[in-house]
Amino acid sequence: MRLRDLVVMAVVVAMTAGVGCSRLTFVKQKFKNDYHRTAPDYAVSDDPEDARRIAAIDEVALAQQGIQSGRLDEATAHANAALKADSKSADAYTLLGMIQDQHGNAAQAGGFYAKAAALAPTQGGALNNYGVWLCSNGRPAESLALFDRALADPAYPTPAAALANSGSCALDAGQGARAARDLGRALALDPTNAVALAAMAQSEYGAGRYLEARAFSERRLAVAPASVKVLQLASQIEQKLGDSAAAARYVQRIGTEFPQQRTNPTGDASQR
């Protein structure tokens, strides 16, 4: 199974900014693939000796705003300015990775995510993002260690996201027991986690438990915008359950909501 679900859906971005000594967190969900990516989370000091670092943080905040509003050229300029102020800013590299992801430049994005993880080897957000890149670029088994390290960060603000990513990628890597464990933990923390729900629907479908797969599929469709792969899987589930009319309705939705997308509703259900 590969990750192409959403991300291929509309981009959902949530950003909470603090000032002074507060934390600044920027959470980006549904990006490029059906995974959660998280941007920098950090604390700011008012010590004058940290002037360059604070300047870099200010530029990172502006880059985040640019990404949020879709002004990617502006975001790139601010991220590069952050690196000029602080060449070891993992946050700036994370944002450059996100920007290249939005441009569809997978190789360049991967380089930036890897650099961020190298500069911040214990920072949950940087590790999660690099893990997502590895998984969505055909290296799911390698990604699992990154998610483990992200979850070991006690300050990581979105463990449900990393658990969902870990479970989904474990499924891709053929590690069913780990997938079940991490997806269950993700849903215990966040019952509306779209990544975990999609992966559970896929897992149950692959195991032949079609009623359970339907339940997870319906929950997934209720909590986030649909994607072609989510609708395709929903159609396949209904076919297995003998409800051809319901299956046809999902196929019709694909044609209506994604008219430019060529799909094969009876094809490989392993792609969400």
Image (spheres, helix red, strand yellow):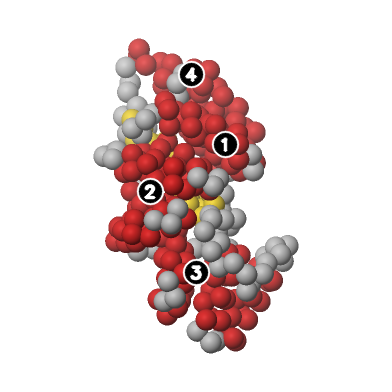
Q: Amino acid at mark 1?
A: Ala
Inter-mark Cα distance, 2 to 4: 27 Å
Q: For mark 3, what is the residue?
A: 221
Inter-mark Cα distance, 3 to 1: 29 Å
Q: Amino acid at mark 2?
A: Ala
Query: Which SS class for mark 4?
Result: loop
Q: Earlier in the sequence, mark 3 or mark 1?
A: 1
Q: For mark 1, what is the residue?
A: 109
Which quadrant of the figure contains the C terminus?
A: bottom right
Mark 1 surroundings within 10 Å by alpha-carbon count, few (fewer than 14), some (14 through 19), many (20 or more): many
Whether residue 144 is visible, yes or no, is yes
Q: Earlier in the sequence, mark 3 or mark 2?
A: 2
Q: Earlier in the sequence, mark 2 or mark 1?
A: 1
Q: Nearer the viewer, mark 2 or mark 4?
A: 2
Q: Please indicate whether residue 119 sits to the left or right of residue 184 in the image.
A: right
Query: Picture coordinates of residue 201 (x, y %)?
Result: 45, 68
Q: For mark 2, what is the residue?
A: 162
Q: Amino acid at mark 4?
A: Ser
